[in-house]
Image (cartoon, grey):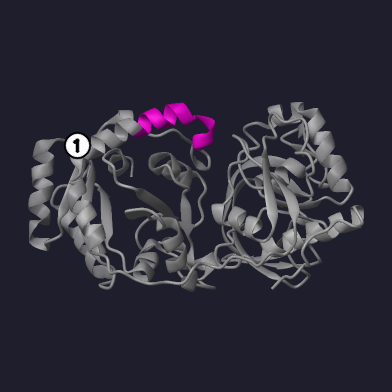
């Protein structure tokens, strides 16, 4: 993406599956918002429209896969693999192969990927971690009989290892300058090592399609929505913010690490995910903000918190005192909880009434005690309870992507509008309508 942009191509990006960190790198590389294509959460019919939204105004859309080509969900719902997204978009696939310990065996690997599902078009290969010119010659010779084009090869270089920790790469928001410099170097190396003209020609060979616009909610009211941002809270899908804005939300960002209070006129609060555990000491030190949030949530401020936002609202995180709007304490663990979840609300919340079903995902190395009982969560390994809710609050580990169903955003804005009308009688605004 960085290499294409550097030579003047308008590049758009999308990531298969639920992910916040990789799209941050995509945004840095392209200068555009990073998007996600998730058929399990959003539905298969939403994938092509969301891809069109991502590609709007660009010359080329690059979709990064998730895990291996055929790895995805199983059980309830679409498989949500990279291969399934490629089928839904009728898009060619470029296979990136770690060739560091292979020569002729690479042909067996590429042949397997190319023939496993014939309707998935493996249209080219880029080799990674190649030992040198002689090694590359062996790899090219091995692939020759398959007829799969070699589009490029990146040499092995430890200097290109990326910074990572327990949830993957370090988010761009934490080290933007350093990551930008590294990305520029890697982009320049890619321009030298990959046939970008062949890659663009391959992309242009994808069939042209006319698809509907992805859904946005009708205006459901008018509310000033404070949205947590900054290094500790960067995990929010752009589609969620766009849905809130379409529903009548005026989005006001704030940084919980630095701002002493919520923005003036805040009528609702959206706390997305992030890494509050990395910044727990700094968050705990911002006592004025903690007190402000605590008082406003206790007074009925319409609030939606996801994962990191849930931890922020807890009494403590790893012993560091936080907002204490949720009657639980959080601790970091060495056990990763992840996967798609079908969640049923157990009581009335700002995002929907009791019985409403939400589709989302979990990804965290923390636990809460007590865990709460606002949601019944169903995944591959059974059912569980979790989260906290009132008529004005939903705080859970569940991440939502509203690209396929923006209804929760409309209900959230409608709830904030209704509360403001009660607190400020005579407030004017459009009638509340939620589909």
Choose top left, top right, bottom left or bottom right for residue 432. bottom right
Q: Quadrant of residue 277?
A: top right
Q: Position of residue 100 (x, y in %)?
A: 23, 41
Horizontal side, residue 223 vs residue 2: left or right: right
Estimate the x, y position of residue 326 in percent, counting from the top left: 81, 47
Which quarter of the figure is the N terminus placed in?
top left
- Residue assigned mark 1: 192
* Residue 52, placed above or below residue 238: below
Point out residue 353 in the picture as x, y percentages from the top left corner. 78, 69
- Answer with left or right where residue 10 lies relative to residue 294: left
Q: Tell me: residue 114, above or below residue 9.
A: below
Is 181 included in the stretch rendered in magenta? yes
Number of residues whose C-alpha sits closer than 10 Å to that of mark 1, classed few (under 14), some (14–19) or many (20 or more) = some
Residue 197 against residue 341 in the figure, above or below = above
Question: Residue 208, position in %: x, y?
Answer: 30, 69
Residue at point 18%, 49% (across, down): 197
**Which element is circle 1 on?**
helix
At horizontal 36% and vertical 34% (from top left) the residue drawn is 183
Which quadrant of the figure has residue 390? Answer: bottom right
Q: Is residue 175 left or right of residue 318?
A: left
Q: Which residues are magenta?
A: 171-183
Query: Residue at (42%, 67%) from the top-left corner?
Result: 48
Question: Can see residue 109?
Answer: no
Residue depicted at 67% across the width and 61% down the height: 247
Q: Is residue 63 magenta?
A: no
Q: Main secondary structure of the magenta part?
A: helix
Of residues 183 and 317, the one nearer the viewer is 183
Looking at the rendered image, the quarter that the C terminus falls into is: bottom right
């Amino acid at each position: 993406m960085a290499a294409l942009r550097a030579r003047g191509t308008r590049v758009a990006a999308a990531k298969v599956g639920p992910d916040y960190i990789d799209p941050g790198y995509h945004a840095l590389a392209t200068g555009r918002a990073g998007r996600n294509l998730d058929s399990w959460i959003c539905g298969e019919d939403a994938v092509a429209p969301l891809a069109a939204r991502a590609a709007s105004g660009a010359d080329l859309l690059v979709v990064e896969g998730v895990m291996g080509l055929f790895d995805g969900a199983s059980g309830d719902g679409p498989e949500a693999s990279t291969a399934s997204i490629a089928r839904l978009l009728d898009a060619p696939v470029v296979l990136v192969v770690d060739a560091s310990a292979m020569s002729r065996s690479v042909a067996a690997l590429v042949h397997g990927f190319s023939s496993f599902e014939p309707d998935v078009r493996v249209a080219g290969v880029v080799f990674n971690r190649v030992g040198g010119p002689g090694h590359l010659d062996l790899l090219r010779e091995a692939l020759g009989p398959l007829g799969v084009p070699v589009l490029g090869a990146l040499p092995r270089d430890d200097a290109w290892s990326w910074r990572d920790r327990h949830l993957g790469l370090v988010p761009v928001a934490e080290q933007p300058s350093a990551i930008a410099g590294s990305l520029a170097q890697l982009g320049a190396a890619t321009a030298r090592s990959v046939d970008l003209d062949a890659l663009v020609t391959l992309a242009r060979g994808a069939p042209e399609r006319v698809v509907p616009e992805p859904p946005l909610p009708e205006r459901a009211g008018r509310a000033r929505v404070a949205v947590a941002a900054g290094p500790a809270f960067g995990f929010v899908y752009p589609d969620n913010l766009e849905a809130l804005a379409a529903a009548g939300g005026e989005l006001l960002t704030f940084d919980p690490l630095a701002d002493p209070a919520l923005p003036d006129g805040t009528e609702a609060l959206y706390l997305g995910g992030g890494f509050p555990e990395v910044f727990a000491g700094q968050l705990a030190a911002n006592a004025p903000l903690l007190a402000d949030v605590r008082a406003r949530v206790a007074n009925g401020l319409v609030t939606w918190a996801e994962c990191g936002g849930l931890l922020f609202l807890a009494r403590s995180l790893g012993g560091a005192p936080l907002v204490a709007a949720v009657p639980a304490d959080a601790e970091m663990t060495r056990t990763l909880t992840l996967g798609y979840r079908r969640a049923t609300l157990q009581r009335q919340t700002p995002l929907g009434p009791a019985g409403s079903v939400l589709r989302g995902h979990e990804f965290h190395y923390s636990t809460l005690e007590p865990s709460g009982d606002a949601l019944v969560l169903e995944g591959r390994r059974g059912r569980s309870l979790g989260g906290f809710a009132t008529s004005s609050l939903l705080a859970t580990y569940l991440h939502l992507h509203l690209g396929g169903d923006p209804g929760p955003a409309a209900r959230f804005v409608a709830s904030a509008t209704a509360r403001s009308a009660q607190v400020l009688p005579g407030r004017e605004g459009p009638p509340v309508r939620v589909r």
